Image: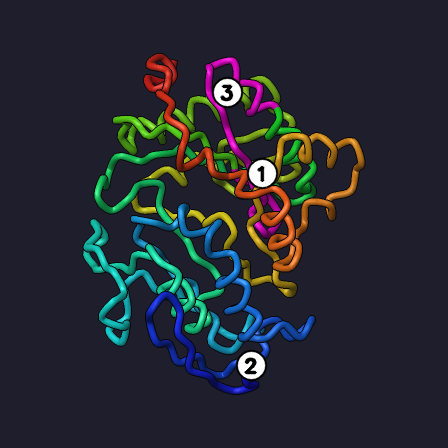
Amino acid sequence: MSPKAEEVEIGGRRLRLSNLDKLMYPDVGFTKAQVIDYYARIGPAVLPHLAGRPVTMVRWPDGVDGKSFFEKRCPPHAPKWVQTTPVAWGLTACVVDDLPTLVWMANLAALELHTPQARAESWGRPDSVVFDLDPGPGATVLDCCRVGLELHDLLEQLGLTAVVKTSGSKGLHLAVPVHTAATDDETKSFALAVGQLLAKRDPKRVTVVMKKEERRGKVFVDWSQNDQNKTTVCAYSLRARPHPLVSTPISWEEVSDAIDGGDPSVLSFEAADVLERVEQLGDIYAPNVELVQELPQLAQKGA
């Protein structure tokens, strides 16, 4: 790519990529050209997790040191070939079903891509349950790992498989694929019931209370992310941190090893790391869009 702008053809679409030499992550010299290159190369892994969902972009036009804004509405200047969908939020959102659209978003400095748990065509019928494990003051990602393993074991006892990824910030995200007729009220109630059980078992480490003063030294199990009006950062999305960190799928063995090693940095992955991981491991988060499971009836009722 040229240092400033270039016209390219991707997937049969012509795109003009602009301001390619602009620093998006100034601390490490990571440019807009590198952001676009990352999304273009990670496309085969990330597209299945974006497909069919209204996407909320978090745009940083002047890089991570500048101002940002959320963009839920598909901008009026979007190319005609960008797919859109009306959503319950009362607007029309972009849908990222192909590589040209993904690259177009990257060119808008949409560093972060956030999605709901349901696809547009089945709104109100989520295909996964998400547990956002957020460390409060005094806690770290290693505390999230310990709670994540407890959660993993509890879900296994319920006959459920869960996948896990870093948030790309300071916590972990667990997802339980369902792909059945569960409603968002049921998945949210399920997440709350499981979180309450964990908090009851381990009250010194776990809380489901949103008040920040209740979260000091604990891991907040955020069950509310399952609301149909909320979104979670997508697997393989960049995050707007000083370094180009990525919300990265990891294995349960890596979670356990991080605890044993006592080093939280082993769960911090930048764009180049993630591209290498996907080349070696494939998409280990794929079960979240492929695996069909059913929520236990008793858990749905909060029992």
Task: Tell me which amino acid carries mark 2.
Answer: Lys
Residue 22 is marked as 2
Q: Is residue 38 above or below residue 118?
A: below
Residue 154 drawn in magenta: yes
Quadrant housing residue 145: top right
Q: What's the distance in space between the residues labelled 1 and 2, CA to CA?
A: 38 Å
Residue 119, position as x, y percentages in the image: 29, 44
Residue 113 is marked as none
Q: Earlier in the sequence, mark 3 or mark 1?
A: 3
Query: Does residue 192 appear in the picture of this structure?
Result: yes
Q: What's the distance in space between the residues labelled 3 and 2, CA to CA?
A: 45 Å
Is the residue marked by circle 1 packed among few (<14), some (14-19), or many (20+) residues within 10 Å?
many
Residue at x-position 39% and y-position 61%: 99
Q: Tell me whether the residue at label 3 lies in contact with that at label 1, contact meaning CB atoms closer than 8 angstroms.
A: no
Q: Earlier in the sequence, mark 1 or mark 2?
A: 2
Q: Is residue 106 above or below residue 149?
A: below
- In the image, which is nearer the foreground, mark 1 or mark 2? 2
Residue 62, position as x, y percentages in the image: 51, 78
Residue 286, position as x, y percentages in the image: 47, 38
Q: Earlier in the sequence, mark 3 or mark 2?
A: 2
Tell which residue pokes out farthest to the right in this image.
Answer: 261
> Of helix, strand and loop, which one carries label 3?
helix
> Of helix, strand and loop, which one carries label 1?
loop
Task: Tell me which amino acid carries mark 1.
Answer: Arg
Residue at x-position 68% and y-position 35%: 254
Q: Say which residue label 1 marks.
A: 215
Quadrant location of the N terminus in the rendered image? bottom right
Is the residue marked by circle 2 packed among few (<14), some (14-19), or many (20+) residues within 10 Å?
some
Quadrant location of the C terminus in the rendered image? top left
Quadrant housing residue 117: top left
Residue 282, position as x, y percentages in the image: 56, 43
Q: Say which residue label 3 marks.
A: 155
